[in-house]
Structures are given as structure tokens and as C-alpha cells.
Image (cartoon, rainbow, N blue to C red):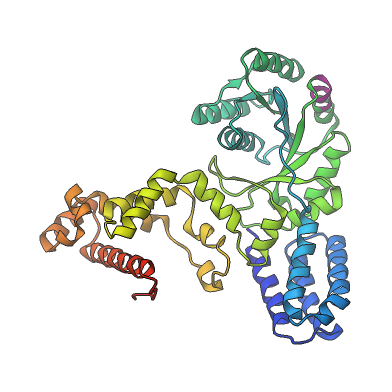
Amino acid sequence: MFENLSERLQNAVNKIKGYGKITEDNISDVTREIRLALLEADVNYKVVKEFIATVKEKALGEEVKKSLKPGEVFVKIVKDELVELLGGDKEDLYTKGNPSILMMVGLQGSGKTTTIGKIALLLRKKYKKKPLLVACDVYRPAAIDQLKQIGKELNIEVYDEGAGNPVEISKNALAYAKENKYDYVLIDTAGRLHIDEALMDELNNINNEITPNEILLVIDSMTGQDAVNVIEGFNNRLPLTGAVLTKLDGDTKGGAALSIRHLTNVPIKFVGVSEKMDGLDEFYPDRMASRILGMGDLMSMVEKVEATIDQDEALATAKKMEQGKFDLEDFLKTFKQIRKMGPLESLIKLIPGVPKELKKVRIDPKDMAHIEAIILSMTPYERRHPECIKNTRKLRISKGCARSVEEINRLLKQFEQMKTMMKRMKNGNFKMPF
């Protein structure tokens, strides 16, 4: 997400950090690089022009001139303006209705049906809501089947009447939700390849009939600058309350995210970061700005840990580490929980101060699966007493997991190094043992 833009911006702002004094000349050099980085990331030209003008004006102001560390003040200015560009404060999803009603709209192929399932899952996990999914895309039978499959996978009920009238279906679904004490109704509507009168009339009719609390527009981030035109097309006919940017994990420039709020005043509420059903993040402008500028995102990291890792088990593991009793069974449990949090390289990027080289590391999921296979091929006794694993045991483990003895040796060595590192951290004498 924003990888090329992030690297270009970081290189630009790092130049200014070395200057003891900020002048119009050196600011012009840096802002030129920032301008090119934003334009190449597909950010709208008008947005870039205004952004650069504001940064330049503030960077040449009295506050920067009087500062002992003008470079750091400049970085703060860039970050603050980036936050403002992305929307300022986070816009929360409406959750106070009884039931709350959300209508999902968008062009065909933008990811509406998958996204509505992701939001339903988030509502249940984070907000403790009881969601009901409603199938109102009656023109594409595959859409109803897809929503039913998502509902089955997530164990969330789907209300559908087949190929009926979408307005009547939404009205009946709302009555059903009230009767069965659902507190959040999510309506999946039809899409088209382009905005047309028939589509907008139908969406307007649903809106007039049930008055949803949220109308979210799903936008494929690979749409680029045309995303703004799509939003304006829907927003002119419907009272949009927010946008969801999908496929930000793909090979996309991401500039749409930096243009949308400024040009349309429609807030981004969610971003799709993976194809998995938990691959949806709430959109925090300040956190996103920090990520783009390479400052990490510790809050998102903490939230991922809290949502994934069992607190009691984590405390028990920490206690074992302190006592020097951490074994391969504990390692496997911890390893499995970390894998649930998503790709390790994505987590590394959230840590503030991580070197640029480490952020580029790509960890093959197959390597992680191999480690798990090796440990699972050990007996419970071997996992609790790894020091007993000698040549004959290694050969048996190797046959059991179809991995080489060299890989087993490497894992055991890394495990011992990790234990040594933990011991030194506990004693306050931390020094890398390798």
C-alpha cells in the first residue's frame, strides 16, 4: 500500500532533515520532489498544487525559521497537511440505531459483496453487533449466491427473496430484522458497469423507503483519478456518508485515497487490505499519513495484537520466558497466533523506526509453513525438551515433515538464539547473540 509513494516522500523529507537552515531554494528542491512523487502516485493535479503551496508557505514561516531543528518541523508540517488532505479526524461508522441500516452501493466489480461481508464481520467482532446481510442485487444470481456463501463462512444470516423487487426486499428485511432482534442491517445493492438512470432510480427508491443511516460507496482503488468522478456521480444523486477503498493491497498507486476527501468531501471510512474476510481496516487519516511517511503505525499494531492474541495465553507465555521455561510447544502456539495477524512484512511496516531495508523484506508463507511442519513432526517430549533432539531424532523428524536435516538444525539454532536473547533482555544486558 503506497509503497512507491512512501519511499519517494521519505527520501524527499530526509533531505531537509540535514539542513541547519531552511531557505526558499532548498525548500523548492524538496517540494519539487514531493510534487513529482504525488503526481506519479496518481494524485489529482489540483490537490497536489494546493498541497505543495500550503507546505511551502508554512515551511517558510516564522515558526520554522526560529526552530533549532527546522528539518523536523518541516516533516511535521508535511505530515499535518497529509492528515488534513486525508480527511483530518477519523469518521466513525454509525452504530446507534435499533437497528442501524447500512446500504452498500458501487459499480459492478468494485468489491461490494465481499466488502459488505467484511463490514458485517467487523461489526460483530469489534462492536458486538448482531448483523443481518440482505441480498438486493437481484439482477445477478451469482451475487446472491456469493453473499450466501459469505454468510455461511462467517455464520451470519442472509435475508433473500430471490429475484424480487429490491425496494420490497429491503423493506421486508428491515421488518424481519426488527422482529428477530438484529441490530445492524447491511443491504447489498446492484451495480452496473457505469452510472445510469435505472441504477440511480432504484437506489434512490431504496433510500427513500428505508432511510439508511449509512450509504457507503465502494471504490476500486485501481480506478485511479476516475474514482473522484465515480464518487461525484453517486453523490449527486444519493446522500453518501462515506467511501470504502478496496484492493489497496494490490499493485496500485493509491493516489485516489489522497484526492477523494479533498475533492468530494466524502470521507473514507474503510480500506480493503487483503482478500481475506478480516482484511478490512477502519480508516484513520493520521495513521495513514504516518505510514506513508515511514513513521510506522503503533496503534494499528497494538489493535491487531489485541484482536488476535489471547491475553491469558500471552501472559502465561511471557511468564515462561521470564522463568527460562519457554519451549518449542510455546513457540508453536505463539507462532500460530502471529500468523493469524497477517503477513509478517505488513506487521514490520507498522513498527516505528524500522530500517528501510527491513521493510523491503519479503517473508515467504511457505517458509513459515515449513517451520510449523517441522515442529509438528516432533513428539510432545521433543517439543518440551529440544535439547534431546540428536541425529537419529532429526532423521525421523526430517522424514515426517519432508524437510531437510539442515532446516531442522537451522530452526533449533534460531530457537536457542531467541532464548539467549530473551535471557539477556530479562537481565537488562541486551546484546544480539548472533
* Image position, residue 130 (x, y; %): 59, 25
* Image position, residue 383 (x, y; %): 22, 53
- Up the image or down, 254 lies above or below 8; here it is above
- Up the image or down, 230 lies above or below 432; here it is above
Q: Quadrant of the C terminus?
A: bottom left
Give 109 or 43, whichever is nearer the viewer: 43
* Image position, residue 390 (x, y; %): 13, 63
Q: Taking the image as drawn, is residue 190 in sight? A: no
Q: Is residue 87 magenta?
A: no
- Up the image or down, 175 lies above or below 401; here it is above
- Write down the quadrant of residue 301 in the picture: bottom right
Q: Taking the image as drawn, is residue 386 in sight? A: yes
- Up the image or down, 18 lies above or below 294; here it is below
Would you say 99 lies left or right of 296 here?
Answer: right
Magenta segment main secondary structure: helix
For the point 21% across and 53% down, the residue is 384
Residue lying farthest to the front in this orientation: 427
- Write down the quadrant of residue 86 in the picture: bottom right
Would you say 358 lies left or right of 107 here?
Answer: left
Give 247 or 345, whichever is nearer the viewer: 345
For the point 37% across and 54% down, the residue is 318
- Write down the quadrant of residue 139 in the picture: top right
Q: Is residue 208 magenta?
A: yes
* Image position, residue 124 (x, y; %): 57, 32
Residue stretch in magenta: 204-209
For the point 70% across and 80% down, the residue is 17
Q: Quadrant of the N terminus?
A: bottom right
Give 387 or 281, whichever is nearer the viewer: 387
